[in-house]
Amino acid sequence: MLRPTRAGLAALALAAPALAGCSFASAQTSRPYDPSDGVSASVGSVQVRNLLIVGSTAQAPGVVSGVLLNEGAQPVTLTLAAGTGAPVPVDLPAGTSVQLGVATTTAPVAGTPGAAVVQFAALGQPAGAVVPVTLSSAAGGTTTVQVPILAATLEYATITPAPVPAPS
């Protein structure tokens, strides 16, 4: 019969933490948080995920990036407003999602993502700041969230504002 030696038991005891892998010392939380650059919100049946604005200076326009998910059985028009510019409506058919910050010419189909471009005029804050954005719908009410403004670099380099026409 084989008997474990003291050296073998000591080696096993020392190897146990290494064999447990990376999760041995990882922290877990039960508190909700956004594991991304943007923020989340809910307005009635509409879930808003990873909402952020891509911009540069306080005087430059900003493009909204994120995802809107209509989990309801009815179409919803969600209105986004920031700064002193006009509110921007986004139509969400029932059971669809819309990716903000991506241009497309096709209408959303149930179960498939659509796309929309939402651009705000000058926000009064540069990249690195946060601005209040008001989200509202007729059925879901209104909520205001603090949305970060990020520079158009790295993964956001392709999300750029449309040129603003010169006054005539």
Image (tube, helix red, strand yellow):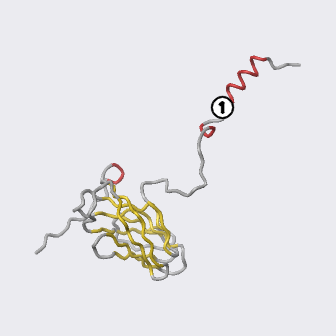
Taking 158 as reference, is 8 above or below it?
above
Disc 1 is placed on an element classified as helix
Residue beneath the point at 39% across and 72% down: 134
For residue 50, which quarter of the picture? bottom left
User: Residue 150 or 162: which is nearer the viewer?
Assistant: 150
User: Residue 108 or 36: which is nearer the viewer?
Assistant: 36
Taking 117 as reference, is 33 above or below it?
above
Taking 83 as reference, is 11 above or below it?
above
For residue 115, which quarter of the picture? bottom left
User: Residue 87 or 102: which is nearer the viewer?
Assistant: 87
Q: Position of residue 14 (x, y in %)?
A: 68, 25
Q: Position of residue 58 (x, y in %)?
A: 24, 60
Q: Position of residue 163 (x, y in %)?
A: 21, 65
Residue beneath the point at 49% across and 78% down: 140
Q: Which residue is mark 1?
A: 17
Side of 36 relative to 28 (left or right): left
Q: Position of residue 139 (x, y in %)?
A: 49, 82
Badge 1, how many Cα within 10 Å: few under 14, some, many 20+? few
- Residue type marked 1: Pro
Which residue is outermost to the left?
Answer: 168
Residue beneath the point at 29% across and 63% down: 62
Instruction: Tell me how many marks there are.
Output: 1
Q: In which quadrant of the rendered image does the C terminus lie?
A: bottom left
Side of 139 relative to 150 (left or right): right
